[in-house]
Amino acid sequence: MAYLEIKHACVHYPVRNTWGTTGEYIRAVDDVTLSLEKGSILGLVGESGCGKSTLSRAIMQLQPLSSGAIYLNGCNLSALSAGEIRRRRTDFQMVFQDPYASLNPRMSIYATLLEALQTRGKIPKEQREAAVAELMNRVGLSPEHMYKYPHEFSGGQRQRIAIARAIAPRPALLLADEPVSALDVSIQSQILNLLTELTRDLGISLIFISHDLSVVHYIADNIAVMRRGQIVEYGSAAEVFQTPQHEYTKSLLAAVPTLD
């Protein structure tokens, strides 16, 4: 059994007007079935508005499903209560798109990472600084800056902090929603390499969401192409890039800029 299984997931939003609902629905996610093996990377790609972020919120249990189910290590997350979801939250974490908005500006990096580290249990006071330092080293940050605040870091450094916070509870599943789109091109490859290393070293399963097929091809083992709430193509990164089957995938590939 795959570590993550999404079975016939649907998220439908009712269309409303001045007098209430119209009886029609926007099918943001429409009958999506996907699976992710432990330790592998799935790239989810599609244009803005295709349903990628809605699906990611459903996986993270931030958005209820209209129908279908999401299983994590055999457990149906869709059937759990809010309290049970909170207790399992350490098993699946998310890295958000905007590193400038995802960190609390009033908390130092030490406080931010310590809070995440202690979600699995209290750390003795004399060991806390060393634990935060080790976490910062893992994501390529200097521990000597742990008492600084988010505004004192660059965008790439902030995203490293966000990644450190996400891996602190030792999750088995990490979901990264457009984690490099707000960064300079020169920094993007560094973050992609960091995510790849963490996936390999920690045995994390990663869902990497992007609108850029070339970025997804760089990092992913398998690629799922999403359009209008549905998965229109799925396969290994090599298969999707070299022999795309769906016309939409071909149009995405044609839009990838090349040097010539």
Image: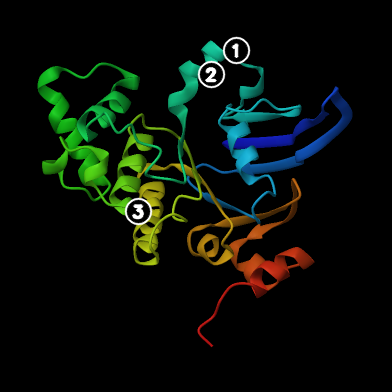
Q: State how far apart marks 2 and 3 are (Cα).
A: 28 Å
In the orientation shown, which residue stands out farthest toward the right? Answer: 23
Please state, as top left, top right, bottom left or bottom right, where the N terminus lies in the image. top right
Q: Across the whole image, how many numbered discs are drawn on residues?
A: 3
Q: Is residue 190 left or right of residue 228?
A: left
Task: Give neighbour class at mark 3: few <14, some 14-19, many 20+ (Cα, 10 Å).
Answer: some
Mark 2 in CB contact with mark 3 (< 8 angstroms): no
Q: State how far apart marks 1 and 2 are (Cα).
A: 6 Å
- Quadrant of the rendered image containing residue 135: top left
List the residue tagged with mark 3: 194
Amino acid beneath label 2: Ile
List the residue tagged with mark 2: 85
Q: Is residue 172 left or right of residue 108?
A: right
In the orientation shown, which residue stands out farthest toward the front? Answer: 18
Amino acid beneath label 3: Leu
Secondary structure beneath dot 2 equals helix
118 in relation to 212, above or below: above
Secondary structure beneath dot 3 equals helix
Secondary structure beneath dot 1 equals loop
Q: Is residue 109 left or right of residue 176?
A: left
Q: Residue 81, which numbered label?
A: 1
